[in-house]
Amino acid sequence: KNSLNRMAKAAATYGKIVEKFSYKKVLTLCELMDFQNKNICLGLKKTGFGAGFYNGFGGKVEESDESILEAAKREVREEANVDVIDCNKVGIIYFSFTYLPELFEVHIYCSTKWNGKPSESDEMRP
């Protein structure tokens, strides 16, 4: 019962937060994890938001994407040139910038299996 009360309070708080923004942008972030070798594959962002910083792979959910998961897989394919085999959702984060009227909702995934070797794209350098 306490768990349900906490979830209800969190949902109400989320609703109040969302009302403050005129737009919500849904994004993905996928971390490629090699636990056996204790490695995580990050990419150096070459263009746009976050350029010059290392990050996981991801981006906007497009209207043509069948689901948020499919958007995450597509972004990894576009940015790292690999096809993820398993891609597990590990969380959602929300953030905003004081100078923008939009809320960012980022669906975070972790993949431990993929086909191909991560390689450079127009957007990222693994």
Image (spheres, rainbow, N blue to C red):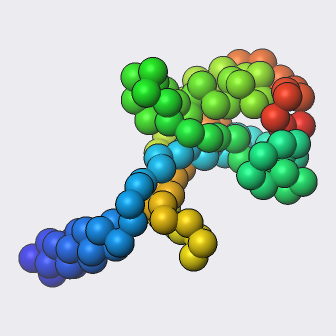
Could you say which quadrant of the image residue 73 lies in? top right
Q: Nearer the viewer, residue 86 or 35?
A: 86
Name the side, left or right, on which 83 lies relative to 46.
left
Q: Residue at x 60, y 25 (%)?
A: 74
Q: Could you tell me which quadrant the N terminus lies in?
A: bottom left
Q: Nearer the viewer, residue 60 or 93?
A: 60
Can you say whether 99 is above or below 60 in the image?
A: below
Picture coordinates of residue 68, whole percent (x, y): 44, 35
Can you say whether 9 is above or below 19 in the image?
A: below
Is residue 41 shown to the viewer in this render? yes
Picture coordinates of residue 112, whole percent (x, y): 64, 37
Q: Which residue is drawn at 41% across and 55% down?
A: 23
Q: How many marks?
A: 0
Looking at the image, the residue that sits furthest to the left is 1
Picture coordinates of residue 126, whole percent (x, y): 87, 38
Q: Residue at x 27, y 74 (%)?
A: 16
Could you say which quadrant of the image residue 32 lies in? top right
Q: Residue at x 70, y 41 (%)?
A: 57
Name the side, left or right, on which 73 lies relative to 3.
right
Is residue 110 shown to the viewer in this render? no
Picture coordinates of residue 106, whole percent (x, y): 51, 53
Can you say whether 125 is above or below 56 in the image?
A: above
Name the side, left or right, on which 4 lies relative to 96.
left
